[in-house]
Image (spheres, rainbow, N blue to C red):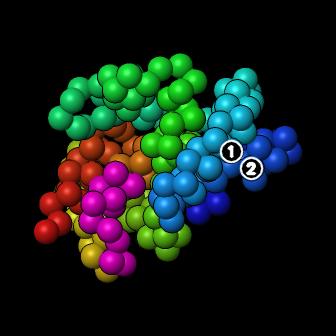
């Protein structure tokens, strides 16, 4: 949904056109070529976005704050790269950074109609309380089933959507956990 895309300057749009945003490639050679070609434009794009503070705070928190990562290892997503020996600019040019870059730029990867239905169910995020969590979580599970979303990706994407909508971290986590219950 375009509403969650960040606005890019003309120069940033040019950098983005040079970046291969695919997560997987046909073969190792293709992936390695994309990695080499992506280095310069990714760093230039991130530098420009950072300079003008274009990436929304909740997306930066998703990347930098350990409280936003509910994995077994308590570290930020950036910290996980560092734990694996990736530091400095290497983090941002690493092929596994591409999904985070996609989130920074475009928001959650859910179909537009799923986003619209979820937003309609939630209503005004400022009015959502802890008593709304169960029905909202159930609705997110129902949307996942109805739209045949990948059950391994959907929890995280709903978590991101909740953050981008302005829901609290605890509510976003509850919705994510609810969607994870799908068998």
Q: Is residue 143 visible?
A: no
Going from the N terminus, do you reach mark 1 or mark 2 first?
2
Q: Position of residue 159 (x, y in %)?
A: 35, 49
Q: Position of residue 139 (x, y in %)?
A: 28, 67
How crowded is the residue under tag 1: few (<14 C-alpha within 10 Å), some, or many (20+)?
some
Viewer-closest of 62 and 129:
62
Residue drawn at x 73%, y 23% is 51
Viewer-closest of 72 and 155:
72
Q: Which label is found at residue 18?
A: 2
Our reading of the magenta stretch's main secondary structure is loop
Disc 1 + disc 2, Cβ < 8 Å: yes
Horizontal side, residue 14 vs residue 148: left or right: right
Q: Which label is found at residue 37?
A: 1
Whether 64 is among the magenta residues is no
3D distance between C-alphas at marks 1 and 2: 8 Å
Q: Which residues are magenta?
A: 147-157
Q: Picture quarter containing residue 1?
A: bottom right
Horizontal side, residue 29 vs residue 73: left or right: right
Residue drawn at x 53%, y 69% is 112
């Amino acid at each position: 949904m375009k509403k969650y895309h960040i606005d890019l300057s003309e120069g940033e749009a040019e950098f983005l056109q040079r970046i291969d945003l695919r997560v997987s490639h046909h073969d190792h050679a293709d992936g390695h070529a994309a990695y080499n070609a992506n280095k310069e434009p990714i760093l230039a794009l991130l530098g420009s976005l950072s300079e003008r503070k274009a990436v929304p705070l909740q997306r930066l928190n998703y990347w930098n704050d350990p409280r936003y990562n509910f994995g077994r290892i308590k570290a930020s997503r950036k910290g996980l790269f560092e734990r694996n020996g990736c530091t400095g600019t290497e983090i941002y040019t690493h092929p596994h950074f591409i999904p985070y870059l996609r989130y920074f730029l475009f928001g959650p990867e859910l179909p537009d109609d799923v986003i619209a239905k979820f937003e309609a169910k939630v209503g005004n995020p400022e009015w959502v309380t802890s008593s709304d969590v169960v029905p909202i979580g159930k609705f997110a599970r129902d949307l996942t089933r109805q739209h045949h979303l990948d059950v391994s990706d959907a929890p995280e994407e709903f978590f991101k959507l909740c953050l981008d909508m302005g829901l609290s971290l605890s509510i976003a986590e509850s919705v994510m956990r609810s969607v994870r219950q799908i068998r």
